[in-house]
Image (tube, grey):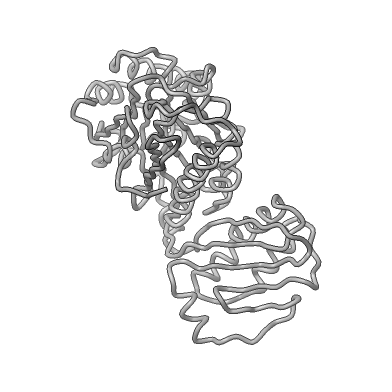
Amino acid sequence: MQIIEGTIASPKGFSATGLHAGLKKEKKDLGVIYSEVPANAAAVYTTNQVKAAPIYVTKEAMADQKIQAVVVNSGVANACTGKIGLANAQEMQALTATHLKIVKDTVAVASTGVIGKQLPMETIEAGINQIDLQHQEPYAFHQAILTTDTATKEIVVTEEINGQTITMAGVAKGSGMIHPNMATMLAFVTTDAQISEDLLQEILADKTETTFNQITVDGDTSTNDMVLVLANGLAENPVIEKNTDAYAKFLAMFQLVSETLAKMIAKDGEGATKLIEVQVVGALNETEARLVAKKVVGSSLVKTAMFGEDPNWGRIICAVGYAGSHTDPGKIDMWIGDQQLLKHSQPQSFDEAIMKQTLEKEKICITVDLNIGAQSGKAWGCDLTYKYVEVNALYHT
């Protein structure tokens, strides 16, 4: 497997573009992904009971798991907008289908931005009518889906599968309201592999649990979260079947794309200066290992300690204790970087100079060994800074 330079349009048969329609003052705010043929599709959505209108429209479009285009706007979430908002999302779908000359029910819709505002449909319509895939700018799509993000998030990988070169690309946005199942997170994955809709959905659901659902920035689960995967089969490989070498290779590609995007989102948390990775080992089962890891990385006290470069292990063990997993309070080992802080829950001396250097890095790794089992799990997050408060205090304005 090889990571290459590219965009969401790198797999065969895909194109994409983005533009400034006018929903935001200056930045690009409308984008489209298009496949030459209807693609087999899989999706997962926010677990928030308050869901944005585009979620309902996309779920309906996904009834037969065939999607040919995705239209996305930023700046306005189209959430908590009632019947008008739902009608606007449906119109956004129809306008895109008409412009691209495809079936309406093969268009997925996504929105991100401020909750409670209605979409300015004249602006949306004018923007959709400007979409020109003959002169596409795929990277502009990456830019058009951003809100408070400081950078685009993308990865493209290739792999030889059954004699054919398979390409898989992923792009995501997310910076705040990040606490998946899932977050104010949109992620799109395209691939030219031939794989069934059902197997694609199974893979997405499984990998979401260990990647996108293992990141947290601020503990808030958004109304608009979506991960959408499109596989158009234009690489013309033999259809990937479960429990084969081809399946194992495809699974590894999907794991790398999903985990990379998840880490990029965590690292780009609003106001963040550090990526925090927590690995929990020695748990009774994988679910509990992931639960503990996410509780630790999601603790505001841990996050502020990492921002302050303070090796306050008390905050970490506190989060371990309230995670709700099986734990023996007398058996916990803990490290920050390579420095061991606890052994069987007893404080250990460490080199303060090395610890200072460790906590100054952009990535901080915390390891917790529960010493009661053989399973492990990871989670990713970021530090909590003064800038986070500033960004969110002024978000609506």
Up the image or down, 145 lies above or below 316; here it is above
Rendered image quadrant of residue 289 = bottom right
The residue lying toward the viewer, choosing from 99 and 392, is: 99
Which residue, as the protein is rendered here, is positioned at the far left? 135
On the image, the x and y values in percent for residue 114 come to 42, 38
Up the image or down, 75 lies above or below 96; here it is below
Lateral position of residue 64 relative to residue 324, left or right: left
Which residue, as the protein is rendered here, is positioned at the far front? 163
**Residue 80 appears in the picture as rendered:** no
Rendered image quadrant of residue 34 = top left
Rendered image quadrant of residue 244 = top right
What residue sits 63% from the left and 78% below the top?
Answer: 340
Lateral position of residue 301 relative to residue 24, left or right: right
Image quarter in which the C terminus is found = top left
Lateral position of residue 345 relative to residue 247, left or right: right
On the image, the x and y values in percent for residue 123 come to 28, 25
Up the image or down, 155 lies above or below 112; here it is below
Lateral position of residue 195 relative to residue 331, left or right: left
On the image, the x and y values in percent for residue 277 come to 54, 62
What residue sits 37% from the left and 24% below the top?
Answer: 69
On the image, the x and y values in percent for residue 229 come to 47, 32
What residue sits 40% from the left and 51% below the top?
Answer: 394
**Residue 291 appears in the picture as rendered:** yes
